[in-house]
């Protein structure tokens, strides 16, 4: 190996014995060195400036710009140093066989199997007992581990907080009266006592009574044009809150499933496979909107039901 | 007294001190021999070998900035009232996680810069992995003996994507919360065990009992990074052990590696490159706003924003969800939900193919030999076109994740855009693969003969307006268009030169171009020798 | 130990050695300044945010005062105030001259589609009884008059200035009563931005996106960007539900809540705190992904091209 000093002096005189690989890539190393020094000075200046701005209070933009410029100066300088002021090569390295030799492999196998036969194979009963012990512990420990992670699903996914007679309330817990919504209005509602619950969130829409296509068995579900559908998309569980009142459609913001509001929220477009569950509504004697019953099917995306 | 001690020792130069220090270490560790070998390790000079380093250095930045962020982030879903310095949210109910992320952004000095650098580093880490993986795939660098390193790399990609998603979900803002809800549905959709898995992960039915954020935090800052650090170490150790691949070229064989030694040349370049990666990340972190959670607000399960997308590396999965037809299978009372196919089956199949690809290819090509020289993409048109098709497929899925943004930008109906992607995602990759195959063959035809031209045909027009084509006289090294064989070069007599000049004038070649006409045959272009 | 000689290379480059004093000086300065830091005033981004809020609140209040002052100047003393009521919480009805002037504008630009008596036609809906807020919204946002009746009307520079629009509103309202009046947004200055943000996320972000950038909806409809809407227009849109937008009547949303949303939209949405740099269009991770891949990885690949060989 030759030091840099020697490389630098050797380039002036033409020496037939010199190794061209040790030449520098830079034609004028002194100038290059100045350039690199300039890069480093830029780096230093930026870091000092960063300190100043830090003390005086600065913005993310100033910090970012100075940090970028500082490290940029260092980076460009170091790359240039490595690229232009070092022997340009190319140098060469031999490859050796990666795998071991046959003898080594044999010696290894002999050591492993030979010694193992004496100590382990003849005591296979002990080995089996050991294996059994670890297996029992392993299987046993799965139980408490998984159990404490979370409850069994049971029928948690089948039911919601909506019950027979649940009052329909707003996000702020205010009960909704029959004349609160105009035709073309919609809002997010919850069962009274469960405001903000994930599975209770429901869309209350008031549509024109004449346009609604009533499904068999749901004749009484939509009094005075009020329709309530689960806000949880049957595709991926996102809250649906795009109501296009002119076209009477609900669009899911996540994957653009489209549901027909007037026809029991049947999916008409996109990946959602099932209609949104509908909440049967009624109006009580004081004019408040209430639920006739809870949802009659699980809300939200599909799952493997146990 | 130090001055008294000094008298006893002769003054040492810097180099002597360094030598003494190194000797002290070597007496205890015995590193000199191995260190020498390490310093002599040759790194090929081709630029495409630097791509993996972008990923490595982004990973370093991720670790450092991540440590900073853990000092301030609070992994808790407990609700509290916001009193920080972001005025529009003052007095609102936020979770401790969101509160601390706001504090990092507005109240911790350098916090926003570090947070944004962390996020950009994640985006660029995975981007660099993707690009690096393309380089390895298209040049066949994964072939024996490097199959294991390929598998380590794909595992790192999978872990990187997972950890990116976990980190994206930690701030508990409106958009990440929606992503988390979708993830619950994805887990839920796995047949047989899905519902249980989801309940275990979240500690109950969605949104769970508040355990998901601490659990994700543990996974994000401890478990996954620890595995990744170990795998990155293994990745590099394997690379040192097996030595680099290289492109074929003068003096480059299966038996050697040609390039720059580790010390000092490569060390300086790569250290400089590390600084440059930091510089780019700092520039982006300071000037390009990423994930402005203060604009999104706290997540509540019943609130949502339109135009929500995951980070780009999850985008292809989101796109797959969008273009999936509305199918769902109900058998014997059990349901296989719609989500299962695009969100579980597709990535499962894709990553498994990635992992076993080296073995598939070896089997198909019956090529079990060791390879240290890389193939150029054109040398293996089948692999290249399959790779290009796969890239096109994933790109289409990614584009499908922004159907709404595209529809809005180009002012077309959302329905139309969706139907386009439902078909184009499966059709376009085949076109891309076919075109790539053709391009490879064309490049091969050129490259096989040392990069020489085919022969020109010129179209001539007679005075009567009749068109006909004529071959220009063969120049040294010209190939026959049809046969691909090298033609006998004409001797460059006066007559031939005149003819060339004539035809050149007809096709409008300038005089400077004419000067570039090949020299006479005896000084013909020197062929690049190849091993 | 011949390999150790490489350790001395950095010390042999004379220019770099000369830099050493600078490094030392810089370090000293840094240390000195960090020591004095405790006495320095630290400005927080929060203060600048408050400045922004106060500035924009003054602008919004001035704009609302100008609208109200135009309406009062339009009311010429000679005219008789027998026209219809246009404003919420305002006792002064429109003047007859406003109605007359409005008829002229209406006959010029609107009657060809909506009919002479605003009764509607096969091409355009009946306007009688829709109310002042609806008419004012469509005219002041420039969506009406419309050239092409097929597409969803787009926001464009309005043909009529605010006072002329008001004339049209007065005329159409005089044809038949009913419908929401033009909301009074003077209470916006006292509204709560935090409450507005919460209401926006629940009721508006689903279509307009959380950054107010707007996006494509189904069936060729789209939710427009909110970045140019005036306070009055925001309130009008909430109350009247233009086109596919749902209607938020007082039963759903109180006037105070509307004012909260108006304040949030005209301040936080229209002047977002982009503390982190360029907002990248406010469309979220897709734009971020493109920037990360094209600019971030792209620049780094260019650096790689410089560092390595290209053969």
Image (spheres, coloured by chain):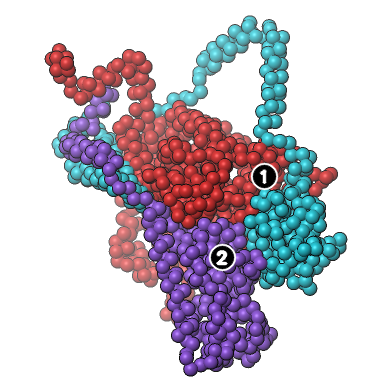
Chain colours: A cyan, B red, C purple
SS for callout 2: helix
Q: Quadrant of the N terminus of chain C?
A: top left
Say which residue appears at 69% left-offset and 42% top-offset.
B205
Q: Which mark is residue B187?
A: none
Chain letter for mark 2, please: C
- Left or right: residue C49 versus residue C13 is right
Q: Position of residue A116 (x, y in %)?
A: 62, 9
In front: A297, or A181?
A: A181
- Left or right: residue C7 versus residue C63 is left
State how far apart marks 2 and 1 are (Cα): 33 Å
Viewer can see residue A301: yes
**Residues flagged by tags 2 and 1 on a common chain:** no
Residue carrying label 1: B206
In front: A90, or B424?
A: B424
Residue carrying label 2: C256
Say which residue appears at 30% left-offset and 47% top-offset.
C41
- Left or right: residue B469 versus residue B355 is left
Q: Is residue A135 above or below residue A198?
A: above
SS for callout 1: loop
Q: Position of residue C173 (x, y in %)?
A: 61, 85
Farthest right residue in view: A217
- Residue B264, quarter of the rendered image: top left
Say which residue appears at 84% left-offset and 64% top-offset.
A219
Q: What count of labels does the image hold?
A: 2
Q: Position of residue B188 (x, y in %)?
A: 70, 43
Say which residue appears at 78% left-offset and 68% top-offset.
A224
Q: Position of residue A106 (x, y in %)?
A: 56, 14
Q: Is residue A146 above or below residue A42?
A: above
Chain letter for mark 1, please: B
Local crowd size for mark 1, using a 10 Å CA cut-off: few (<14), some (14–19), many (≥20): many
């Amino acid at each position: 190996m030759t030091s840099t000093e020697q490389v630098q002096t050797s380039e002036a005189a033409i020496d037939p014995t010199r190794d061209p690989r040790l030449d520098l890539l830079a034609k004028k190393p002194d100038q290059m060195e100045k350039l690199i020094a300039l890069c480093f000075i830029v780096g230093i200046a930026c870091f000092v400036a960063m300190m100043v701005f830090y003390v005086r209070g600065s913005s993310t933009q100033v910090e970012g710009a100075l940090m970028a410029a500082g490290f940029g100066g260092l980076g460009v300088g170091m790359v240039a140093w490595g690229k232009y002021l070092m022997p340009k090569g190319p140098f060469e390295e031999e490859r050796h066989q990666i795998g071991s030799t046959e003898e080594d492999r044999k010696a290894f196998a002999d050591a492993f199997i030979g010694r193992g036969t004496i100590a382990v194979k003849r005591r296979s009963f002990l080995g089996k007992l050991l294996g059994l012990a670890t297996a029992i512990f392993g299987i046993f420990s799965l139980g408490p581990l998984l159990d404490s992670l979370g409850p069994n699903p049971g029928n948690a996914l089948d039911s919601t907080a909506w019950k027979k007679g649940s009052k329909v309330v707003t996000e702020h817990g205010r009960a909704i009266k029959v004349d609160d919504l105009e035709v073309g209005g919609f809002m997010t509602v919850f069962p009274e006592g469960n405001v903000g619950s994930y599975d209770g969130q429901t869309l209350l829409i008031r549509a024109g009574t004449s346009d609604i296509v009533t499904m068999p068995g749901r004749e009484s579900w939509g009094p005075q044009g009020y329709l309530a559908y689960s806000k949880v998309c049957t595709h991926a569980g996102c809250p649906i809150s795009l109501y296009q009142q002119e076209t009477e459609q609900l669009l899911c913001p996540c994957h653009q499933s489209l549901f027909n509001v007037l026809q029991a929220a049947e999916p008409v477009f996109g990946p959602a496979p099932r209609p949104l569950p509908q909440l049967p509504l009624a109006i009580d004697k004081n004019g408040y909107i209430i639920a006739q019953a809870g949802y009659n099917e699980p809300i939200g995306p599909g799952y493997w039901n146990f | 007294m130090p001055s008294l001690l000094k008298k006893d020792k002769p003054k040492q130069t810097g180099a002597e001190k360094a030598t003494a220090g190194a000797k002290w270490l070597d007496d205890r560790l015995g590193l000199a021999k191995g260190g020498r070998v390490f310093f002599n390790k040759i790194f090929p000079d081709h630029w495409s070998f630097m791509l993996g380093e972008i990923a490595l250095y982004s990973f370093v930045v991720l670790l450092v900035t991540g440590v900073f962020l853990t000092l301030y982030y609070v992994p808790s879903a407990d609700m509290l009232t916001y009193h920080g310095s972001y005025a529009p949210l003052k007095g609102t109910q936020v979770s401790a996680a969101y509160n601390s992320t706001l504090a990092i952004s507005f109240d911790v000095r350098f916090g926003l810069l570090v947070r944004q650098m962390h996020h950009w580093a994640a985006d660029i880490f995975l981007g660099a992995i993707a690009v690096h993986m393309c380089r390895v795939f298209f040049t066949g660098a994964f072939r024996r003996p490097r199959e294991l390193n390929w598998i380590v790399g794909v595992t790192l990609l999978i872990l990187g994507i997972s950890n990116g998603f976990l980190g994206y979900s930690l701030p508990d803002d409106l958009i990440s919360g929606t992503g988390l809800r979708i993830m619950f549905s994805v887990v839920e959709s796995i047949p047989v065990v899905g519902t249980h898995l989801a309940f275990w992960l979240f500690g109950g039915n969605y949104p769970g009992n508040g355990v998901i954020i601490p659990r994700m935090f543990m996974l994000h800052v401890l478990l996954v990074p620890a595995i990744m650090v170990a795998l990155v170490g293994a990745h590099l150790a394997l690379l040192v052990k097996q030595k680099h691949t290289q492109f074929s070229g003068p003096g480059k064989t299966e038996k050697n590696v040609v390039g720059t030694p580790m010390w000092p040349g490569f060390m300086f370049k790569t250290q400089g490159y590390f600084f440059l990666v930091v510089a780019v990340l700092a520039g982006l972190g300071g000037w390009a706003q990423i994930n402005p959670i203060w604009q999104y607000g706290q997540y509540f399960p019943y609130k949502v924003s339109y135009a929500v997308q995951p980070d780009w590396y999850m985008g292809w999965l989101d796109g797959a969800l969008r273009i999936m037809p509305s199918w769902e299978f109900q058998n014997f009372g059990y349901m296989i939900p719609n989500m299962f196919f695009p969100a579980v089956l597709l990535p499962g199949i894709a990553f498994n193919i990635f992992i076993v690809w080296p073995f598939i290819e070896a089997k198909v090509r019956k090529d079990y030999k060791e390879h240290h020289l890389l193939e150029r993409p054109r040398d293996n048109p089948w692999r290249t076109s399959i790779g290009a098709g796969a890239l096109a497929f994933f790109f289409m899925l990614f584009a499908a994740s922004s159907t709404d943004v595209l529809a809005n930008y180009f002012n077309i109906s959302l329905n139309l855009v969706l139907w386009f992607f439902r078909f184009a995602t499966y059709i376009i990759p085949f076109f891309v693969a076919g075109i790539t195959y053709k391009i490879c063959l064309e490049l091969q035809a050129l490259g096989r003969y040392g990069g020489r031209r085919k022969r020109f045909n010129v179209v001539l027009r007679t005075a009567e307006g009749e068109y006909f084509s004529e071959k220009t006289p063969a120049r040294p090294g010209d190939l026959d268009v049809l046969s691909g064989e090298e033609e006998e070069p004409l001797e460059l007599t006066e007559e031939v030169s005149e003819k060339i000049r004539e035809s050149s004038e007809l096709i409008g070649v300038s005089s400077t171009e004419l000067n570039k006409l090949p020299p006479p045959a005896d000084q013909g272009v020197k062929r690049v020798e190849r091993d | 130990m011949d390999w150790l000689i490489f350790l001395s290379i950095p010390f042999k480059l004379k220019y770099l050695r000369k830099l050493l004093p600078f490094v030392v000086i810089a370090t000293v300065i840094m240390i000195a300044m960090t020591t004095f830091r405790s006495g320095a005033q630290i400005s927080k981004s929060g203060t600048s945010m408050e400045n922004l809020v106060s500035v924009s609140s003054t602008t919004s209040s001035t704009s609302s005062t100008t609208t109200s002052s135009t309406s009062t100047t339009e009311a010429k003393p000679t005219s008789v105030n027998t026209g219809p009521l246009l404003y919420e919480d305002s006792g002064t009805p429109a003047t007859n001259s406003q109605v007359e002037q409005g008829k002229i504008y209406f006959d010029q630009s609107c009657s060809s589609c909506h009919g002479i008596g605003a009764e509607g036609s096969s091409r355009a809906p009946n306007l009688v009884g829709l109310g002042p807020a609806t008419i004012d919204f469509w005219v002041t946002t420039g969506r009406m008059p419309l050239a092409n009746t097929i597409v969803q009307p787009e926001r464009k520079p309005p043909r009529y200035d605010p006072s002329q629009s008001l004339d049209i509103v007065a005329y159409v309202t005089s044809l038949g009563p009913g419908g929401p009046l033009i909301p009074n947004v003077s209470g916006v200055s006292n509204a709560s931005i935090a409450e507005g943000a919460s209401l926006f996320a629940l009721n508006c972000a689903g279509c307009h996106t959380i950054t107010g950038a707007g996006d494509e909806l189904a069936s060729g409809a789209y939710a427009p960007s909110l970045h140019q809407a005036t306070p009055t227009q925001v309130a009008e849109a909430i109350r009247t539900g233009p086109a596919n937008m749902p209607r938020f009547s007082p039963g759903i949303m109180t006037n105070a809540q509307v004012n909260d949303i108006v304040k949030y939209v005209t301040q936080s949405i229209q002047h977002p705190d982009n503390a982190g740099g360029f907002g990248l269009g406010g469309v979220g991770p897709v734009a971020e992904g493109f920037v990360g891949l094209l600019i971030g990885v792209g620049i780094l690949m260019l650096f790689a091209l410089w560092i390595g060989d290209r053969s």
